[in-house]
Amino acid sequence: MEARLGARVHELVDLGWEPLATTETTAALVGRRPFSWWLFLFVIFIFPVFGGVLYLVFHLATSRATVFLHVENDGVVTAGDTWLVASQEARRDAHVEKQKQIKERGFLAVMWPQLLVSLLLLAGWLVLLKWYFGSAA
């Protein structure tokens, strides 16, 4: 396998992709699209008994993503679900930056907005579930 292609395949494997097929100048990698937690919670709320199972089956059936790489002239060309690769790389860069800020400023100084929102969402879901199951009884 060509060195540039091998380096790019290694980068994508680090992001969670799995090699499907490789040759000297091409590679195909597979992965999964992100799981939509908001849609999952919405489906569970609308269809409390089987909604979660149906969404999980739907996600497993439709979430396969594929990236194709091939060497062309002086570089590696990417095709397929490139939006997912770009999203993963952006999240990785944001994660590295956040870790750097946590190390410099401290955990609570950096993470307090996310902690507050998480607690508010949890309280909101508890109120919603109490209302939902309280009115059903």
Image: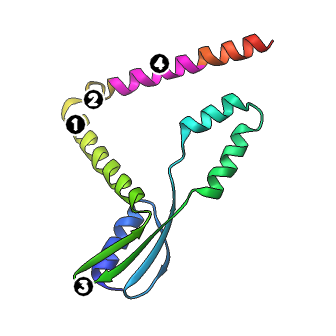
Residue 105's x, y, as percent? 20, 30
Residue drawn at the location 61% of the way across and 38% of the way down:
40
Q: Which residue is mark 3?
A: 73
Task: Tell me which label, 2 or 4, sits earlier in the chain.
Answer: 2
Residue under label 1: 101
SS for callout 1 = helix
* Quarter of the image where the N terminus is located: bottom left
Tell us which disc is closer to us: 2 or 3.
3
Residue positioned most to the right? 137
Q: Earlier in the sequence, mark 1 or mark 3?
A: 3
What's the residue type where badge 2 is placed? Answer: Val
Whether residues under marks 2 and 1 lie with C-beta atoms below 8 angstroms apart, the answer is yes
Please state which amino acid type lies under the numbered disc 1.
Answer: Gln
Write the residue at 27% across / 29% down: 110
Magenta segment boundaries in residue numbering: 113-125
User: In the image, what residue occupies the spot 32% across and 75% down?
Assistant: 77
Q: Amino acid at mark 4?
A: Leu
Question: On the picture, is 91 further left or further right than 130?
Answer: left
Task: In this rendered view, identify the residue nearer to me: 114 or 26.
Answer: 26
Q: CA distance from mark 2 to mark 3?
A: 44 Å
Indicate which disc residue 115 carries.
none
> Hey, what amino acid is under mark 3?
Asn
How many angstroms separate mark 1 from mark 4 (CA)? 24 Å
Q: Nearer the viewer, mark 2 or mark 4?
A: 4
- Give the number of the disc on residue 120: 4
Q: Position of residue 36 (x, y in %)?
A: 54, 42
Q: Nearer the viewer, mark 4 or mark 3?
A: 3
Instruction: Kindly report the secondary structure that dominates the magenta region of the rendered protein.
Output: helix
Estimate how packed mark 1 is, as few (under 14), some (14 to 19) or many (20 or more) residues with alpha carbons within 10 Å. Answer: some
The residue to which callout 2 is attached is 110
